[in-house]
Image (spheres, grey):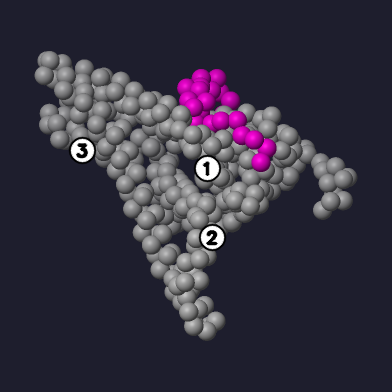
Amino acid sequence: MKPSYIGGQAVMEGIMMRNGDKYAVGVRRPDRQIEVKVEDYRSVFGNLKLMKLPIFRGVASFVDSLVIGTKCLMYSASFYDDEEEAQQEKKKKYTGTQEEIRSQMEADKRKQEKRDQWLMNATMVFSVVLAVGLFMVLPYLLASLLKRLGVSEFGVTAAEAVVRMALFLGYMMLISRMKDIQRTFMYHGAEHKCINCIENGLELNVENVMKSSRQHKRCGTSFLLLVMVVSVLMHFIFVLVPVMWLRVVGRILLIPVVAGVAFEFIRLAGRSENPIVCAVSKPGLALQKLTTREPDESMAEVAIAAVEAVFDWKAYLKENFGYEESPSEKEAQ
């Protein structure tokens, strides 16, 4: 397998694919047509050299993925607003000459963009706070109740690890049973299959995508599992900290380091066939059975459209696998 370094994310009835300084969102519209939007990728941290160093680049990648992912999710959801109702509202709302109506619509568009930006920022902040509270702080607070039974701080930290993993796996199992989420997980599977198809040297078409694996070592699911595991290991350094609130704050401050370490391993796993790396990757691959589902062919078509918008897969296959286009393909171009 040759790493392509393209990555993606499932959104509502679609897929986002990112390659280098571009990303594309492919969405299956209500009329069944595929809408593809391509935008430049701009890091939240700009060109700050520090954020390109090991560990730091993991933090940058996580933040950027959260920003772009939320933006793409909101974009995909916009296709599924009640269009008929929206058109009726527009007819009632705007009056005057065509020029006046156009001006009113542009003003409303600017207002809507500001509201969307505020909503996106609020959603991201809420999501991060909720995740930190649920998976980092709450497990320690629950485990700390064992102190009443005379359990040592080392024992509390060990119990915290069990509670954290139980909460995380329970959360994954719960959301995997939700019908709306299951459809998104089908698109998640299509995303993985599409990338695996390319990285295994196969021509990018629906047939090859459908027979490819829906598991991938660079998946965000594997990253999250590694974050849980790395945090468990790192939190043992707080065993000797005497004050409880300092132990809690320390766990929160350590999150960027934990994310950075997990990112470095995921990055390594994506390009390595080392037996040890593959063995460590297996739990994450197994967990992906919960967060991916077998897609249908229409979802594979969306994934292909998103990839082709930002990635020259033919050039990649030619460079890494000696791929040559068939005469019929050349004629079609």
Q: Residue 80: which disc?
A: none
Q: Please, what secondary structure does the residue beneath circle 2 have?
A: helix
Q: Earlier in the sequence, mark 1 or mark 3?
A: 1
Residue drawn at (21%, 23%) of the image: 143
Q: Earlier in the sequence, mark 2 or mark 1?
A: 1
Please report the bounds of the magenta region as a residue range: 269-298
Q: Please, what secondary structure does the residue beneath circle 3 have?
A: helix
| Residue mark closest to the camera, 2 vs 1 | 2
In 3D space, how far apart are the residues under numbered discs 2 and 1 (Cα atoms)? 29 Å
Q: Earlier in the sequence, mark 3 or mark 2?
A: 2
In 3D space, how far apart are the residues under numbered discs 3 and 2 (Cα atoms)? 50 Å
In 3D space, how far apart are the residues under numbered discs 1 and 3 (Cα atoms)? 31 Å
As for residue 246 lying within the magenta part, the answer is: no
Relative to 58, does residue 221 appear above or below in the rendering? Answer: above
Are dots 2 and 1 in contact, CB under 8 Å? no
Say few, some or many: other residues with alpha carbon within 10 Å of mark 3 (under 14 / 14 to 19 / 20 or more): few
Res 259 seen here:
yes
Q: Residue 81 in the image: x percent, y percent?
A: 50, 55
Q: Residue 249: which disc?
A: 3
Q: Residue 270 in the image: x percent, y percent?
A: 55, 33
Relative to 31, does residue 161 appear above or below in the rendering? Answer: above
Q: Would residue 146 appear left or right of 5 to someone viewing this image?
A: left
Nearer to me, 52 or 71: 71
Say few, some or many: other residues with alpha carbon within 10 Å of mark 2 (under 14 / 14 to 19 / 20 or more): few
Residue 160 location, quadrant: top left
Q: Would residue 298 appear left or right of 111 to someone viewing this image?
A: right
| Residue mark closest to the camera, 1 vs 3 | 1
Q: Residue 84: which disc?
A: 2
Q: Residue 9: which disc?
A: 1
